[in-house]
Amino acid sequence: MLGPHPEKTSFRLCCASLREGDKIVSVRGDHDLLWLRNAVLQSAGFKVLSTEDESTALEQISRMDCGVLLVCYSLPQPVRNRLARAFREKCTDGRMIAIANMKIEKPESADAFVHGLEGPETLISTILQG
């Protein structure tokens, strides 16, 4: 679990599951948690585009340089569906990871599921499992 000073937490891991230039596109409706997750992933060495905006995420996906779509299940179902559909169409080699702070079953559209309260190590490990 992340301590009281996330900026002092350092994860230096190889991003072997992503191709050179690929990014993690992280989409979530909660601003504070989105940016905390962004800081954790960047400190682990990942290239991350974090956004609360569906249009920005879809634009990034359309460029086909996303290796992982990290989609929060706090987003409305129609938004999750549009993001998943675009990602599967454009980033065919990528992985979609669903994340939620509530207990749910792994969605069929996702390749993996992370319970957000499991901490940053679990999220990073799941991304690296590629």
Image (cartoon, grey):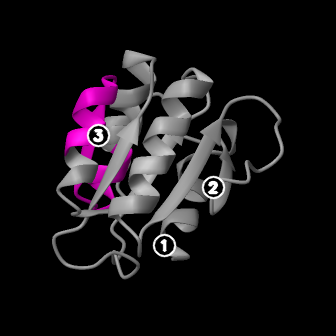
Closer to the chain start, of discs 1 and 2, is 2
Residue at 29% across / 53% down in the picture?
Answer: 43
Q: Is residue 5 above or below residue 119?
A: above
Q: Which residue is mark 3?
A: 58
Q: Is residue 117 above or below residue 98?
A: above
Please state which of residues 21 and 61 is positioned toward the viewer in this rendering: 61
Q: For residue 83, which quarter of the picture?
A: top left
Q: Position of residue 54 (x, y in %)?
A: 34, 28
Residue at 37% across / 17% down in the picture?
Answer: 31
Q: Which residue is mark 2?
A: 110
Residue at 39% across / 29% down in the picture?
Answer: 34
Q: Is residue 115 left or right of residue 16?
A: right
Q: Amino acid at mark 2?
A: Ala
Q: Residues within 10 Å of mark 3 (few under 14, many from 20)?
A: some
The mark found on residue 128 in the picture is 1
Q: Position of residue 104 (x, y in %)?
A: 82, 38
Q: Is residue 127 left or right of residue 23?
A: right
Looking at the rendered image, the quarter that the N terminus falls into is top right
Q: Is residue 90 above or below residue 106?
A: below
Q: Position of residue 53 (x, y in %)?
A: 30, 23
**Residues in magenta?**
40-59
- SS for dot 1: helix
The nearer-to-camera label among 1 and 3 is 3
Residue at 21% across / 63% down in the picture?
Answer: 65
Q: Amino acid at mark 1?
A: Leu
Q: Amino acid at mark 3?
A: Leu
Please state which of residues 2 and 15 is positioned toward the viewer in this rendering: 15
